[in-house]
Image: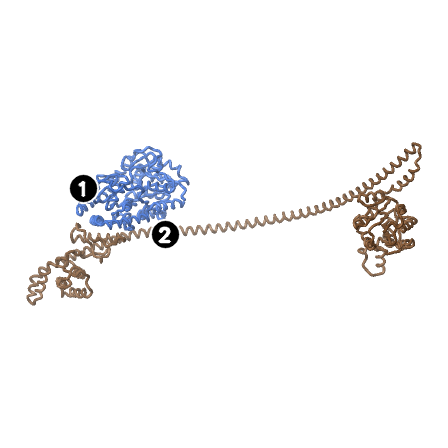
Amino acid sequence: MDMFATSDSEVDVERLMHEIRAAVNGNHHTAGPGSPERLTGAEHEPGSLILQPVFHRKQNNQYHVNDLLRFHGEEFLRIAYRALLLREPDPSGMAHYSESLAGGRFSKIDVLASLYSSPERRRNQVRLAGLWLPLTVGRLERIPLIGNVIRLMIRLPRLLERYRQLEFSLTSQQQRIIDHQNRSHKELTDRLAEVHESVQAWMEHQQSLDARLRQSEETAATRLAEAREYIDRCTTKLNKHIDRCTTKLNKQIALQDETLLQQQQELQQVKSQTDAQLQQLLLGQEQTLVKVVTQQRELMTQGRTLSILLEEIKQNASGVPRPDLSPIAADEEAHLLDGLYASFEEKFRGERDEIRERLQVYLPILKNAEITDAVLDVGCGRGEWLELLSKESIQARGVDHNRIAIEGCRNLGLNVVEEDALTYLRSLSAESMNAITSFHLVEHLQFEVLIGLLDEAFRILRRGGLLILETPNPENFMVGSYSFYADPTHRNPIPSETLKFLLESRGFGIIAVMKLRPWDAARIEGDSEIVKRFNEYFYSAPDYGIVARKP
Amino acid sequence: MFDKSIIIITPWFGGFAGGAERLARDMARELNKRGVKTFVFTTCCSSPFVNWWHNDYEPGVCEVEGIETRRFSTGNVREPYDAVINKLRGGKPLSTQDEHDFFKYGINSPDLVSTLVEYINDDYELIALPYFHGLTHSVINEYPRKISLVPCFHNEPQFYWNATERLLNNAKHIFFNSPEEKQLTISRYGRKVGRRIVESVVTGVGVELAAGNGLPDGELERLPESYFVYAGRKDRGKNVHVLCEWFHDYATRFNHNTKLLFIGEGDKSLIPTANHFIDFGFVSESKKMQLIKQSKAVINLSENESFSIVTMEGWLCGVPSVVSAACPVTRNHVRRSNGGLFVSNKDEFCLALNYLEKNETLRRDLAANGRRYLAREFSYDVVLSRYLHELAAN
């Protein structure tokens, strides 16, 4: 049997120690510690004060009545039940015997006798020695009169003995109660002192913490205020600094803007000056180039003339006259101004592209007449018309007296002949050409040469062949009074009516008189007669062309 | 990760294994195992119970059980210390100068104290122990708030000396071995030293059964059939004389064949000549464990314990403990763990031993409870983490 009321898994040291202490206390009244027995019943709570001995049930179920009589009160009844009936008392039995004992009707011997005489005890085979004598005495005491004598004779001395035992027992119990209370009081006092010290220490610690906390809070508040003040000061200083910096920066920016603007203006000025200088330079370069070309041409012309003259001098020196060289010399004399005129035309005639654009107006006339070859351009100059015809696959030839112009045409791969116009026309067969064109030539000719040119043109054109002439229009006052005379080789301006008359008089039929490129953009706005006349006189076509056909 | 090295300063190391030295040795060993480089600085003294003012060891660096140990010469003057001891024995009151002499001329080493200046920096944490010996006072007072203290306080006269207050004030951290030790310190010095005691941590002491300890059964010959064990210094301060008296009573009244084995050094004269007392003296750790393992219980009636490792060792070996109810430390260990019994007088002692001797189930359950308590509260992982957490805090 396990000695401890603990399970294997749940050992309670406090409970064990209480049991040990209870056993120690119990040993003062029972056997010595040599017999390790169960100390208490399970009903004894740890730490409780035990005033009665502990009952130990015997394995052989044999007791002496004194084993049970040392218990008192309800504890006696419980022990008697456990010992004799092997069970706890039932409530009714417990109540019955308690009342009997409390009312003095039953003694403890009577209770034991009652339980001992029960069938339950007999079944359990529990034996109780020492019961017969006190039971017998008790029964004798109940006999009237005799009982009183017996009681006086037997009970009185026993009663005195019991009284002394009771007195000792009660005194001992009182002393144990007092000792127990004193120990408990001392333990409680010690524990309270420990708790008090701990609480005191913790309270002091708490107070210390509170004080530190308050101090920390105050310090923190002070520091916070200082920090805020510092931040405010810093913010103010910073704002001032920012303002100063901003002002300074704005000034610098304004200054830089001004400087930049000034520099831009200076740059623009420099650029304008540079552009002007560049323009001037280009102009000068262009002029220089023209001069160089002009001088080259003149040099070439003069060189050729010089070689002819040298040849003539040699002949004269050898005494052999060369009459054949005179006409040559005369011819060369006629070419002395070729370079000059070529340069003149470069400057005043206009750009090649512009001239080609102007001459486009005559192409439809040739196409309408289904002319695809045998076109002769008299006074072809730089060859712009021949270029147009070549692009249109119309076979054409040019003739010009100016060697510089002829050389330029040949460099462009054009079919040209260097010859005097009238001389060349006279060399051509009659009715051999489909069209004869001549742009800005007739105003350079003497009247007789002009008539001769018209007659030769009529001769060599096939029937239906076209003659196209273009010349400045003297109806435009600016042309007739000013620009016509810009070319010193111009002889007379020829009004369109005059040229028309001359053509018709030499046998041509007039197809069209084309007033070319009037200055419409420059015309003055208005419907008045003066405005009309002014626009007609000054902004009418500067050139005109006449298309004539050989009938 | 704790990235500093630790220097443990203890008065002696490598010879006599008292509680403080064991604490230092185990802590150094386990810290090294966990990658925290730990050294021991100590004196050339081998034990406080021999001629401790002599240099039993050579000064210099050596290795003790795998721990790099640096020894320094002891101070050679002992007369002032002896004078104080004589006063104590005569029950005479001590002056402040006496207290000073007690610590200055006890186990100490001026060389060690002066050398520490090289190690007071951010690379090292220094821990000194125990408070009872002069070396601890010297190093901590020389370098105020630079060296931590494991005081191992007991309720004894030296605890109440003024020098203890100074020590507490100058220590960097204070590590208590038990709540009772801390409570004792608060009661005495709470108001004087202030909150740093209240805020100090109770680390406990690491207690684990070292691997390899414990010899195979049968290797110990001629052991009694039934015996109890006292493991520790034989000293009146440990109530060994009381233990002898009470056990004599138990053996006489309950079981003549039951023996009490004494393990450890100390005053042999305390043990009466009787058949039921056997003194093994100093034994190896493994032999000690084996002896404890086969015993019925470990008994420790000392009332001055700051932690009581020997109480724990019983649990480690599978036996319960019997301790004095008058010792708050051991009593509360037993209460908290449900791992043994605490007795307050001879009768309780006898009954307690009798129950334990006759009830194997009870012994096993109590020991199992104690072992669980150790694993929960005093495994090295738990204890060292408390130390390192505190040391790493600043």
Q: Is residue A3 above or below residue B133?
A: below
Which residue lies at the image location 57% right of the left edge and 48% below the top edge?
A241
For numbered disc 2, what is the local secondary structure? Answer: helix
Label placed on residue B275:
1
The amino acid type, in three-letter code, at marker 2 is: Gln
Using the rendered image of the protein, determine whether residue A367 is visible from the camera's viewpoint.
Answer: yes
Q: Calculate the distance from the C-alpha at mark 1 to the C-alpha at mark 2.
A: 57 Å
Chain A's shade in the image? brown
Amino acid type, mark 1 = Asn
Image quadrant where one finds the N terminus of chain B: top left
- Percent position of residue A299, x then y: 84, 39
Write the residue at 6% across / 67% down: A145
Verify CB contact (< 8 Å) between mark 1 and mark 2: no
- Residue count near mark 1 (Cα–Cα under 10 Å), binned few <14, some 14–19, many ≥20: few
Q: Are marks 1 and 2 on the same chain?
A: no
Residue A16: percent from left, percent from top? 24, 52
Q: What x and y, as percent, mark residue B210?
A: 31, 42
Image: A453 above or below A118 = above
Q: Is residue B170 visible?
A: no
Q: What is the chain identity of the residue bearing mark 2?
A: A
Pick the front one: A94 or B308:
A94
Q: How is the rendered protein coloured?
A: by chain
| Placement of A81 over or under B319, stated as above or below | below
User: Quick one: which chain is blue?
Assistant: B
User: At numbered mark 1, what does the secondary structure look like: helix, strand or loop?
Assistant: loop
- Residue beneath label 2, please? A206
Image quadrant for the C terminus of chain B? top left
